[in-house]
Each structure stands twice: as C-alpha cells, then as structure tokens.
Image (spheres, rainbow, N blue to C red):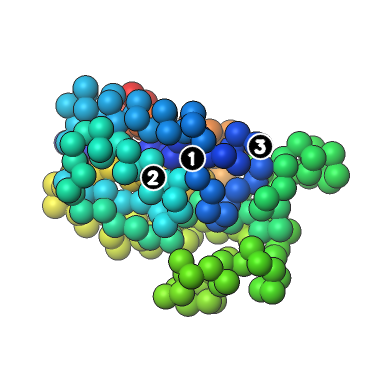
Amino acid sequence: MLKLVLLRHGESIWNKENRFTGWTDVDLSEKGIAEAHQAGRILKQKGFIFDLAFTSVLKRAVRTLDIVLDEMDLKEIPVFKSWRLNERHYGALQGLNKAETAKKFSEAQVAVWRRSYATPPPVLSREDERFPGHDPLYKDVDVNDLPLTESLKDTVERFLPYWHGSIEPVLRQGKRVIVAAHGNTLRALVKYLDNVSDDEIAQLDIPTGVPLVYELDADLKPLKSYYL
C-alpha cells in the first residue's frame, strides 16, 4: 500500500480578504502560517516521512511546504516546483472581492464562474498586467500555455500531464510523496483519483492547511482517503 499526502496551502492574505486569488502571488496570513505549522506537527506525530515533495511556484504553497518540512525535520528532501500545480486562473476576476463581484454580476453568475465544471470566468487580455506572461516566474513557459482564464475543466487538463509524467512515476517506485498545492489543483486530482462526476466536484471543498491522506494500491487506485 502506498500513501500520498495532499495539502492545500494555509490561509492566504487574499483568502482572508475574500478575494479571487488565482495566480496572484500573495503570501500566507498569520492564520495560514499557524495552519502550516500545525499540519507539519500533525504529520510528524502520525509518523509520516517523505522522500520528496511537489508544489506550485506560488509563494503561499511554497511557504506552506517549507514550514511543514521544517516542522518534520525534512528540509533536505528534494522539492519539485511546477506552474502546472498553480491554482486555477480566475481571469479578469483576480483581485476582486467575491461579495462585491456577486453584487455587481449577481450571486447566480458568480456561482457559475466559481463552481461550474466547464464555464470559465471572464478572460484577461494579454496586455493586462495580471496576465502571467508579464511575470518572470513564467519566463521559461511557452506563452501559449499560459492561461487568460480557466474553468476547473481547464485546470484538470493543465494539471494531469504533470501528474502522469512526474508524480505517478515516483509513486510507482514506492517513494513517499507530499503535494502542497491549491484548492482547485487538488480538487482536480481528487476528481481524477476518485472518478468524481462533473456535477459532484462542484460541491467539494478542500480546507486550508489540513493534510488529506490517500491510501493507494499498486495501480495507484484509492483504497481510502481521510483528513488528519
């Protein structure tokens, strides 16, 4: 049996402010830092050890992972970062307050943008400063791969090649892995692992800073999953 640990980053400053964050590179809030420390302590208490770790390039996930590994005395393990583990890109909604956006466009419309599987938010233009092509973090990424907006379906399609090409192979070698990422990239993985329907995934929330453990068989099929 293999164990895979998934961890959504701790609360970010924009989580606290109820803003659409997406690829905006905001840091953890004080609560988020505390959540990361607690996650690391719980994992250590439960006897978890990791051989390597995966995370996005966004500082809220990177910092969460760094705190967790420090708490576990595992700072020396290899850490692999990829933009494919980034949060879903919220397009022109990024930076906007969710409640104010609901007042402007209606709660029903915002619910569609946030929760439908295949309907993305309004797109950015490539000239918009929020377009990732302007960020040095993505200088080595083909500009045509960088999103102007994303639905959850788009996020699944962006993330799964990395899962199959980079994470699956090391799990099959028996490596002990933690993935520290974001609500929607982890929802994308849960959808894939558990074969969750497009409608059901809309109801799934993953809490910040709480380790989610998957026990997998030799074919990487889930036997069970649970939060610590």
Q: Residue 4 at what x, y percent from top left?
A: 27, 40
At label 2, the amino acid type is: Arg
- In this image, 130 relative to 226: left or right? right
Sequence-wise first label, 1 or 3: 3
Q: In front: mark 3 or mark 2? A: 2
Q: Secondary structure at mark 1?
A: loop
Sequence-wise first label, 2 or 1: 1
At label 3, the amino acid type is: Asn
Q: Which residue is pictured at 72% across the width and 47% down the height?
A: 96
| Residue that sits furthest to the front in the current view | 30
Q: Residue 208 at what x, y percent from top left?
A: 47, 33
Q: Residue 213 at what x, y percent from top left?
A: 31, 32
Q: Residues within 10 Å of mark 1 (few under 14, many from 20)?
A: many
Q: Could you give the CA–CA distance between mark 3 and mark 2, rounded to whole angstroms?
A: 20 Å
Residue at the disc numbered 3: 18
* Residue 126 in the image: above or below residue 34: below
- In this image, 26 relative to 171: left or right? right
Residue 81 figure quarter: bottom left
Number of numbered tags placed on the structure image: 3
Residue at the disc numbered 1: 28
Residue at the disc numbered 2: 63
